[in-house]
Image: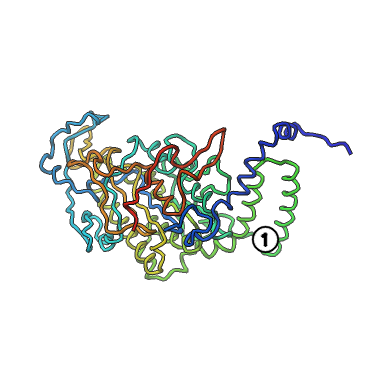
Amino acid sequence: MHDTFSRRRLFLRSGAGFGSVGLMSALASDRVFSGDPSVGDGLHHAARAKRVIFLFMNGAPSHVDTFDPKPMLAKHAGESPNDHSIDKKNRAGGYMPSPFKFAAHGESGVVMSELFPKLADHADDLCVVRSMHTDVPNHEPGLLLMQSGHQQPTRPSMGSWLSYGLGSVNANLPSFIALSPGLPVVGPQLWSNAFLPGQHQGVEIDTNHSDVEKLIHNIRHPHLSRSDQRRQLDLLQQLNQIHRQQRPGEASLETHIRSMEMAFQMQREASEAFDLERESQPTRRAYGDSEFGRSCLLGRRLLERGVRVVQVFYVKKNSKQPWDTHRNNNSGHEKLCADADQVTAALLSDLKSRGMLDDTLVIWGGEFGRTPYAQVDKDKDPKKAGRDHHHTGFSMWLAGGGVRGGLMHGATDDFGMHAVEQRVHVHDLHATVMHLMGIDHTRLTYRYSGRDFRLTDVHGRVVDDWFA
């Protein structure tokens, strides 16, 4: 029988099969680092953390109002900063001291502001990094850099890289889930798999809802029983496999086949995992009923069931970046921190009570910080003063997952303008997170468009001072 070549098959064969590289990567990706990270099976080195949850404060919290006290701001209040790094001098007012009191907490003496009374009880679990810095003070590139290691779209997000490197613990749930009650600035690019195989795309869940059927659409088939669905899917998958065999080199087909099987398995697993009603009243009360509270409680349930990476975005349905306090910084932070404090403390307590904190890495922070000087409106009303974007020095913290608790790492200058001691770039954060998860960031690469890519590109160093 005469073998007829399609144009696509002709190019694939004449190109010595290079088109099959993507499919080979897709099929092999779960074998790169399979197994339990607690024993280091298949990892670059023994992992300290099995899973990670990143609590992302969209819009950027003010470091000088939360974790980095600066008494010099009060001494020089109202004075114009003599700093050539200020890009938008027309928006810059004088130095603005924080109205919030700071105190040391725990046996370790970790300092934080009065905005976090409940988190203060966990001071000895926190590694507070006061010397973060990033490349730009604009939201879009700042968000992309923090999530994907690159200022421009579209590169794989950190969650996708971890999914690609570590594979899945639970075959019935995605390895990477993004919880967001609204689209943040930039949107789905923040959990994109980009050129990595499609199964490593973050699955977005809208946590405006608590009802399982609203959280995940089509979780139940309107007509067929589960056994009927299984027979239907088996037939469809057989046809898909025939289709794939006739089109070698198309990784998207393998991704599509996997996604259909995953969707079927999730009908059973997700119905239980996403049902917050299964939690006790005291637990739900501890987290509260805010969007952030529901997201973090759901995040804990997903981590407990084998999801590798959970990204929680602090956004609201009608607010893409609540922490972007260009106006009313003080009152804005009072409200935001009250919610974040309750929920974050509840998550840490919950993880600890379940014996999960030791191998769960918790990260808290935004895309950059906020200026130590005021941003005033056209009326120059000091009561409405805000703080502008600030990228040369800000704070984040980590807890659990092999991190050394009770640590304050690095420092900014006397005014909180620039990171000056033990500086940590976003690339360094990514390198360290990957190291804690058992991955050497220089060795986890993916070949695309003629070059090897990695999360940290050609940058990044592991900050081993953070390790317990």
Taking 161 as reference, is 143 left or right? left
Tag count: 1
In the picture, which quadrant includes the N terminus?
Answer: top right
Residue 304 seen from this side: yes
Q: Going by the picture, which residue comes out furthest to the left?
A: 75
Estimate the x, y position of residue 330 in percent, counting from the top left: 22, 47
Estimate the x, y position of residue 95 in percent, counting from the top left: 16, 38
Estimate the x, y position of residue 179 in percent, counting from the top left: 45, 52
Residue 389 seen from this side: no
SS of the residue at dot 1? loop
Q: Residue at x 61, y 55 (%)?
A: 263
Front position in the image: 217 or 167:
167
Q: Residue at x 72, y 49 (%)?
A: 240
Taking 389 as reference, is 150 left or right? right
Which residue is tagged 1?
223
Q: Is residue 332 above or below residue 230?
A: above
Taking 38 as reference, is 251 left or right? right
Q: Amino acid at mark 1?
A: His
Question: Which image quadrant for residue 146?
Answer: top left
In the picture, which quadrant includes the C terminus?
Answer: bottom left
Front position in the image: 112 or 274:
112
Q: How packed is label 1: few (under 14 Cα within 10 Å), some, or many (20 or more)?
A: few
Q: Residue at x 31, y 52 (%)?
A: 465
Q: Going by the picture, which residue comes out furthest to the front?
A: 45
Question: Which image quadrant for residue 222?
Answer: bottom right
